[in-house]
Image: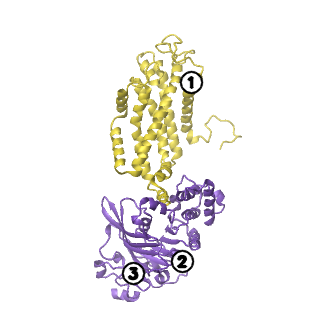
């Protein structure tokens, strides 16, 4: 689809077309993942050192200004990726694994165990997620690890429900009956003939949830239940900046970072859904 | 059905098979007590409309019915009652000595696994000692057996890359993977084009005869079984209404439903019994099983006795029929009804 003879144009190339949101989303994700992995080698001021005067507005030297302790906001914002991105990966992966496993069991085998799992899901989902996460995080104490555990507790039921619904649908398909007729046992049927057909909505949801986890992690840090100072975590930085109302740039950097990350993952999730499920518009 | 000679023990013996479904709305009878026999290497045609219970009965043989189904009676395979067999042993039989060909080969294959891998899985499930290379060789052999061109190349194709006819061939190849003694083909040609239907039936007939497999051919199309089966059993509303050797059944159908079915099959020579005759009405649903003859509301011969008393399946000539008027030849029976 890419033709070498075509003149260069400023429009997005034709092959991107409807996939532009996906491309933007993936681009944003790629940037932040790279930042998370390599930011310590970038030519930035150290995030914890006082490098300039305090509370300096954005300038050529400090693009996003400096905070109350004279630290470079841009450097701290980029270093924030080292906390937000891994935490999102860990929380979503754990939620998908735990929720997927329990949801698959509940959907495929049903019975008393399935009912018990789904009631636990119902109870968990009955709480507003932020409140439940706060309660769990507060009882575990501050720290990013505890915030991550709290978020896994909040998140797995969503995947349990999603995977269960998918399994219920897929297990009624004829090829599942054919697999049983071929002599396959229940675990084999579930793992090979049911679950591989359930992953599309899981993938789409997981992509979008990365953004949501980043947001919730920042929220927990903002209220002091996640990362603690002087960690350059976005929520903690916004919390810092909120104290300096007239020095807007302190919160602006991490705020924009969160916005861009959440938007990027949402774009990517939307794009993936359009790509994987042609039926939805 | 005539008793099999002692030297030729039946492959499959079904006695008084009943299947009930428990639903929130009550218990419904899908199969109301059927008897069937199949000797090794023979073909039995099981004919009936949608909802007549033919597929349910055959799924009961393989133990494929959902947990809310209650199956009673006896299903003896080589003398062993499958209904009392532990699940572990049933699993070994399924796809091993008893295999099934499904109606729609598009939905019966896992869309995200290659055809070759699915056939290989079937082999591996019954012989875990097979190496990857052996699996591949045997899979190619099977695909060649059902006349799939270039089996070595097709082995890595996904189901959607096959045409409907090729998929059904592959499905047959898969069913034959472990040299089954009993093959249940559930409407194997219904989802296919007419021209492809003939090819698939040819493949099935050729392999059945060559490999000496006992075949139960489930269909709603009398034309499909006419050329293949030795015996035909006609099901209606969960019961067998007539069973007879194929020639006798077509020459002298004893049950008015069978006559209706035969009258509804178009004949290429345009001759026969005049214009095609449809059977009026529709079969009773699961929830509306009657106390008398289930066919009575649609039957041209129906009399008061038919709605009051369910006719038993009784031996008549070379076969069996369940009709109060089956004893008399057709015209006389029609006369008696008036």
Q: What element carries label 1?
A: helix
Q: Can residue A281 be seen in this view?
A: no
Badge 2 is on which residue? B227
Query: Residue pushed farthest top?
Result: A53
Query: How far apart are labels 1 and 2 at the CA level?
Result: 75 Å
| Location of residue B198 in the rendering, given as x and y in whole percent from the top left corner | 57, 71
Give the number of the disc on residue A184: none
Q: What element carries label 2?
A: loop
Colouring convention used in this rendered image of the protein: by chain
Tags 1 and 3 touching, CB below 8 Å: no
Quadrant of the rendering where the C terminus of chain B is positioned: bottom left
Do the residues marked 1 and 3 share a common chain? no
Residue pictured at 32% horizontal, 70% vertical: B289
Residue pictured at 38% horizontal, 25% vertical: A141
Name the quadrant containing residue B163: bottom right
Give the chain of mark 3. Answer: B
Query: How far apart are labels 3 and 2 at the CA level?
Result: 22 Å
**Left or right side of B156 for B228:** left
Nearer to us in this view, B98 or A23: B98
In the rendering, what colour is chain B?
purple
| Location of residue A98 in the rendering, given as x and y in whole percent from the top left corner | 43, 40
Mark 3 or mark 2: whose residue is earlier in sequence: 2
Give the number of the disc on residue B321: 3
Chain letter, yellow: A
Give the chain of mark 2. Answer: B
Do the residues marked 1 and 2 share a common chain? no
Quadrant of the rendering where the N terminus of chain B is positioned: bottom left
Q: Can residue A46 be seen in this view?
A: yes
Category of crowding for the residue at label 2, using alpha-carbon neighbours closer than 10 angstroms: few (below 14), some (14–19), many (at least 20)? few
Give the chain of mark 1. Answer: A
Badge 1 is on which residue? A39
């Amino acid at each position: 689809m890419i033709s070498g003879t075509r003149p260069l144009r400023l429009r997005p190339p034709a092959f991107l077309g409807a996939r532009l949101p996906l491309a933007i989303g993936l681009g944003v994700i790629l940037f932040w993942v790279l930042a998370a992995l390599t930011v310590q080698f970038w030519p930035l001021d150290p995030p914890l050192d006082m490098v300039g005067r305090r509370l300096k507005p954005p300038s050529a030297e400090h693009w996003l200004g400096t905070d109350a302790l004279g630290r470079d906001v841009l450097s701290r914002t980029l270093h924030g990726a080292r906390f937000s991105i891994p935490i999102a990966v860990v929380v979503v992966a754990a939620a998908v694994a735990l929720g997927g496993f329990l949801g698959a069991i509940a959907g495929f085998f049903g019975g008393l165990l399935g009912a018990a799992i789904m009631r636990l899901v119902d109870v968990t989902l009955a709480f507003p997620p932020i409140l439940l996460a706060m309660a769990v995080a507060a009882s575990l104490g501050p720290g990013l690890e505890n915030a991550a555990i709290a978020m896994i507790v909040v998140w797995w039921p969503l995947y349990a429900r999603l995977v269960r619904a998918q399994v219920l649908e897929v297990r009624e398909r004829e090829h599942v009956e054919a697999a049983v007729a071929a002599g396959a046992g229940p675990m084999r049927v579930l793992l090979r003939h049911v679950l591989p057909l359930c992953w599309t909505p899981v993938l789409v949801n997981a992509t979008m949830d990365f953004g949501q986890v980043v947001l919730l992690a920042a929220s927990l840090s903002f209220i002091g239940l996640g990362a603690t100072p002087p960690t350059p975590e976005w929520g903690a930085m916004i919390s810092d900046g909120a104290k300096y109302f007239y020095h807007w740039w302190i919160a602006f950097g991490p705020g924009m970072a969160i916005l861009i990350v959440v938007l990027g993952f949402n774009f990517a999730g939307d794009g993936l859904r359009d790509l994987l499920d042609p039926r939805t518009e | 059905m005539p008793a099999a000679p002692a030297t030729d023990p039946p492959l499959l013996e079904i006695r008084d098979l009943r299947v009930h479904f428990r639903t929130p709305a009550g218990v419904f009878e899908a199969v109301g007590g059927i008897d069937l026999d199949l000797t090794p290497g023979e073909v039995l045609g099981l004919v009936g409309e949608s909802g007549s219970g033919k597929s349910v009965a055959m799924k009961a043989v393989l133990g494929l019915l959902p947990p809310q189904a209650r199956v009673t009676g006896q299903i003896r395979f080589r003398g062993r009652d499958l209904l009392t067999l532990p699940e572990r042993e049933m699993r070994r039989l399924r796809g091993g000595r008893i295999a099934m060909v499904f109606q729609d080969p598009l939905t019966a294959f896992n869309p995200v696994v290659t055809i070759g891998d699915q056939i290989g899985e079937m082999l591996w499930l019954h012989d875990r000692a097979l190496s990857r290379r052996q699996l591949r060789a045997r899979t190619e052999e099977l695909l060649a057996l059902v006349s799939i061109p270039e089996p070595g190349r097709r082995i890595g194709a996904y189901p959607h890359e096959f045409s409907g006819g090729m998929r059904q061939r592959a499905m047959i190849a898969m069913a034959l993977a472990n040299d089954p003694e009993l093959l249940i083909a559930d409407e194997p040609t219904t989802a296919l084009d007419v021209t492809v239907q003939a090819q698939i039936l040819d493949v099935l007939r050729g392999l059945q005869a060559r490999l000496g497999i006992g075949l139960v051919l489930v269909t709603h199309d009398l034309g499909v079984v006419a050329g293949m089966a030795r015996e035909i059993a006609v099901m209606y509303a969960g019961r067998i209404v007539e069973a007879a050797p194929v020639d006798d059944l077509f020459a002298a159908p004893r049950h008015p439903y069978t006559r209706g079915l035969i009258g509804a099959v178009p004949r290429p020579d345009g001759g026969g019994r005049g214009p095609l005759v449809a059977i009026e009405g529709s079969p009773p649903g699961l929830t509306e099983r009657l106390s008398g003859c289930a066919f009575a509301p649609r039957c041209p011969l129906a009399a008061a006795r038919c709605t009051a008393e369910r006719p038993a399946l009784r031996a008549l000539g070379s076969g069996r029929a369940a009709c109060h008027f089956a004893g008399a030849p057709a015209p006389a029976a029609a006369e008696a009804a008036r």
